[in-house]
Image: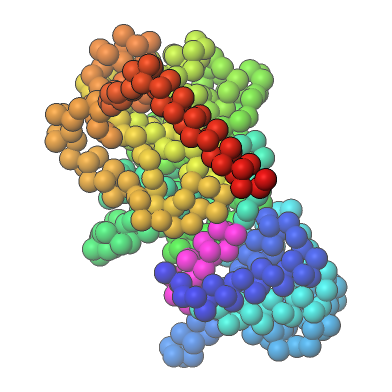
Amino acid sequence: MITGEIKSKIDKIWDDFWTGGISNPLTVIEQFTYLIFIKQLDDRQIRMEKQANLLGIPIEKPIYTKKQAPLRWSNFKNKDPEAMFDLFTKQQRELDDLTAFDFMKTIGAEGGEFAKFMKGAIFMIQSPKLLDKVVQQIDQLPLDNRDTKGDLYEYMLSKIAEAGTNGQFRTPRHIINMMVAMAQPKKDDIICDPACGTAGFLVSAGEYIYDNHNDWFQDKTFREHFHANMFHGNEFDPSMLRIAAMNLQLHGLETPVLTGKDALSEANGDVNDAYTLILANPPFKGSLDYDEVESSLLQTTKTKKTELLFLSLMLRSLKVGGRAAVIVPDGVLFGSSNAHKSIREELVENQKLQAVISMPSGVFKPYAGVSTAVLFFTKTNSGGTDNVWFYDMKADGYSLDDKRNEIKDNDIPDILKRYHNLEAEADRKRTDQSFMVPFKEIKDNDWDLSINRYKEIVYEEIEYDDPKDIIKAIKELDKERTDALLTLENLLN
């Protein structure tokens, strides 16, 4: 957790960007990210120099040459604003026509996963004063601690207060953490988010392992797996991909496998049986033409709706035995089209659907008021659904209005406790907040997965007075009103 002091520093940086003329939240995050990366490059070289001095040997592959020293953070941060701004905006002939920003774009794989996605990056800070303000403030941030630097970047990301395009919006961190805690990442998992956005699910999965299985890092094989092949993300938007890479990097996930392509297109058609755990909140509102969609996805469910196509993609991408935790709009649960029914039938009859958690519509405010649910399923290709666990989440620890203030009511601890002890749920009644529904009942209901289809509501009987008594009482009240008016009239006369 970051302190109030660090939050205040982030707030000040954010405000300075806005007063400096950069009002698009995504642009603010991007520029902030670029500067952090430039500082990280210099910090990395400083560590290399200290080690070289200690061992008495030269640095084998320095990030900056001696000639490029002026482009280093530790050098330009002390310059006056105009000179610093020139280093970022004007080509330096003595430095092979590089600017500090250009250098960051040419670093390549040596700079980690983030540096691979620098094509198209643009420096948007328009004044020396703003650049100097932001550089001096970033220089004071505690970027040498994995937990702190990851949390401060998450706090910066939380300030994005606008919905994205095509149904993309930021998934609340506590909902992500709930899904990860339910999925419980395993030591040999290969984890993927096919629409990763800012990589919140991958970050949370990594944090879960750090917090709950730190002993795994004593195993060399696991360390290599964790850093090389455990985390996979796909994101079509280049800006979001850069932000995702930095988010992962600041959380200690230096070399995730990130891919910049449309997950539903032919370009991604070679991804089959690749992952053992998928965590996702794919775009809801998109609609694609059939010729834009990879053909195998349409074999599971012929549709143009992205939320259904992503479910089909997950089934194709998972290894047999692989699990998925995915957020879907409520329409997926009860939609009456053939496409809706066929994907539900596939999940329940041919795979193993474990749980459906219905979430209140305010969970995604202020971004959207859409009602959603979380599906948990395992790819078996041979069925296995005996009972499906339903939970009616009524509170997530925050008010369900646009303010989303923290409150005491929170069903998430109860959800986690019950999900990891489903045997005890067998005797729960349909009037309870959670209960089991057998396979046959779901099949008989046309594969409907909406909790309201199965939940029973207890109605309290209310006894009303006899109409004659009600009429008599009204007449008495009317008489009292008339008498009161006459008394007032007499007093006035």
Give the camera-side residue of 489 and 453: 489
Looking at the image, how many numbered discs can be counted on the residues?
0
Q: Nearer the viewer, residue 28 or 480?
A: 480
Rendered residue at 40%/22% (across/down): 472
Q: Is residue 2 magenta?
A: no
Q: Which residues are magenta?
A: 143-159
Residue at image coords 65%, 61%: 29
Residue pictured at 77% horizontal, 70% vertical = 19
Left or right, residue 131 beside residue 439: right
Q: Is 316 rendered above or below residue 248?
A: above
**Where is residue 76 drawn, in percent x and y?**
72, 84
Vertically, is 228 above or below 37?
A: above
**Which quadrant is the C terminus positioned in?**
top right
When asked about the image quadrant of residue 262, the answer is top right
- Main SS class of the magenta portion in the image: helix
Rendered residue at 49%/38% (across/down): 361
